[in-house]
Amino acid sequence: MSKEMCDFEVTEVLRQKGIRKMEKQKDTIAITLSDNNKIIRSTIYKADFNKSIRELKKACSPYIADKLIIQEIIMIISMKWNELIGNDNASNEYSLRYVNTSSIFDEIKKDKAANGNVSPETWNTTLIEKYDNLMKVIDDNLAQLRPQIELELSVKSVLNIRDCTLPLPMIVLGAPSSLKTQGIELLRKWPYTYYTDNFSARSFVSHNTSVKKEQLQEIDMLPKIKDKIFLTPELAPAFAAKDDDLVQTLGIITRVVDGHGYFSNSGAHGGRGYDTPMMFVWIGAAVDIPRRVHKQLSTLGPKLFFYRLPKEFYSEEEYLKQIQGIDFAKKVEAIHAALFDYLKWFELCPYAKIEQTSGLPKIEWNTHEKDEEEALRYLIKLGRLLGHLRASVPTWDTSHSQGSEYAYSIATIEEPSRAITQLRNLARGHALSLGRNFITKEDIPIVVKVVLSSASIERVTVFDLLLAHNGKLQTTVIVDSLNTSSPTALRTMTEFKAIGLVDKYTNAESSHVMEIRLKPEFNWFLTPEFQKLREGYKPHAQGGGADIETQNDHEHCNDGDSKRSINVDNIDYCVTNKNNESDPKQQQEEDDKLVAIESSGNADSQPHHFCQLDGSAPTGDKETIRTGKVIIRCSKGSDWWRCTGEKCKAKGDIYAMRRHIC
């Protein structure tokens, strides 16, 4: 057969669906339809298989409504790709990918044919059996994957809810080597996914100057994730960007997850983008979310949701059992097989209708008849709590003028309606993953875990401590329970009052002891019912202890080059350079000496001094302030007192340091 003409075998299924003939004509694929002998033509790009497939899908869509038929056409073209381009010996990874995807659709069609009109009862019973089998396979092989897979199936199922148009972004947070990436990889070969290891927010709608404007649509990512599960296994680079880039990245993301498309302008290509509905769900992963990301999200609109994987602790014997057991790749293969067995059966839902534009099975929600009202009320309570936990509120120290106290400005608290809608969608997705089109209390625990993960870990930890003490906390309890300083505790208590979760009271005996009490409207979180619904879940920080962050934009440190900010245990301190003539080399030498002292383990034998409220301050060229395991190192170079380290634990230490150093 010549390279100019290449006929493709048309299957009986395609014939029944109106495809009469498929052939290559010069540099195009020609598909002849039975009706009116209409010919669909699509260009073959010999050097770009991916582009050829996109053009084929675009050409077929106006004339072939059934997306499964288009996928079968793509499979046939993929199998013949090397023959199409006149390269009989070459292999193509892209064609293999499409063959795999198309074979899954083929298996689904065979299952439908084999099971005929399966009854709702049979489908539901079998789906639960396959779900239980999947969880058993996970428990037998990689048990730590179970929470993540339960979450991912819930998020994935949101795509199958009819008339649900609000994208659901869910970021899994887990320690390194916690298998969070592996959990995402398991879904990679499912047909309704779009996977990328790395992306820029600007790639949603590209303005690449090296590409002609009319070709940019081919590289835009936003239309590629429409009606898909968007998989991004590593989001650390996006969240670690510099402040200006971070604001822009989060700004684009928060707009995209509105689901109304995205339109942007540039000097290179002017205005371009998409103003049509863009439904998708997003499953990403990161080790943890930096504090500044939460701060920016609360300003831009906190539309991302997070799930902190439970902390796993294994004994030496358990680790030994792991490495002596079945090979890791075989464990993953077993889970993958059980997962796809479940997913393929889900596609057979007898009361689902295939959406013509996406090919997705869409299921009508039984809102008015079976949704449990009590479960819906729980969702409302959780949504309201999340709005307060994610609120943005600036606080600052006023000890220099008003005693041991902190002041705050008006908090920015999100209106909870959107969060409630998203939490309800997550609950609906969980219900649908178990074969139900109505919400029950069984769907609430996963929502509780997401709510306790979607605010900063510092706030959630204090809120958890508040619940553990029956809704009442004094300064000393926070200091002792969280091993923190009194000023940190006072600032945290002020924050909780500002965000509207608690009322704050001053101790009659001491102005340094405060008490906060949970507001009555949140008393449900003190009940045994809430404790039961959270299933013992306790979010943990995934990235280790708190770091000192140098920042220049804090409210109380804005006097130009004469001051700089450090953040110690989430409290911002302004350090003054008295004459702005410090010697960097001398500073580094001093720092090296102090680090050497600490690393030698002899810090306690070095001169140390506890700052007191009576006005004393560190003296000499360097001092190590140490209480227990906590150190603040202060060194003096050219009249610049520089403080590094963590926190000072004795009462009044931080106040005195602010008074005399800052």
Image (cartoon, rainbow, N blue to C red):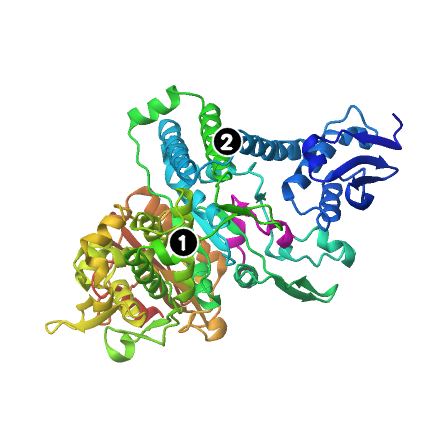
Outermost residue toward the bottom in this view: 401
Position of residue 537 measured from the top left corner of the image (x, y, whole percent):
29, 47
- Picture residue at 54% right of the left edge, 56% below the top: 241
Q: Place residue 10 in its image quadrant.
A: top right
Q: Magenta region: which residues?
A: 221-246
In the image, which disc is placed on residue 115?
2
Q: Is residue 194 visible?
A: yes
Q: Nearer the viewer, residue 98 or 90?
A: 98
Dot 2 surroundings within 10 Å: few (below 14), some, or many (20 or more)? few
Image spot of residue 39 (x, y percent)? 82, 44
Give the residue type at disc 2: Asn
- The secondary structure type at the circle numbered 1 is loop
Q: Is residue 234 magenta?
A: yes
- Contact between labelled residues 2 and 1, with CB atoms less than 8 Å apart: no
Q: Quick one: label 1 or label 2, which is nearer the N terminus?
A: 2
Using residue 291 as the reference point, say whether residue 59 is left or right of it: right
Q: Is residue 116 covered in magenta? A: no
Compared with 278, 614 (above or below) is: below
The quadrant holding residue 178 is: top left
Residue marked by disc 1: 366
> Mark 1 belongs to which amino acid?
Asn
Q: For marks 1 and 2, give the CA distance.
A: 25 Å
Helix, strand, or loop for circle 2? Answer: helix
Residue at position x 72%, y 29% in the image = 79
List x then y, in percent, for residue 382: 32, 59
**Circle 1 residues within 10 Å: few <14, some 14–19, many ≥20:** few
Q: In the rendering, at what x and y percent does residue 410 appear? A: 36, 76
In the orientation shown, which residue stands out farthest toward the left?
509
Q: Is residue 240 visible?
A: no
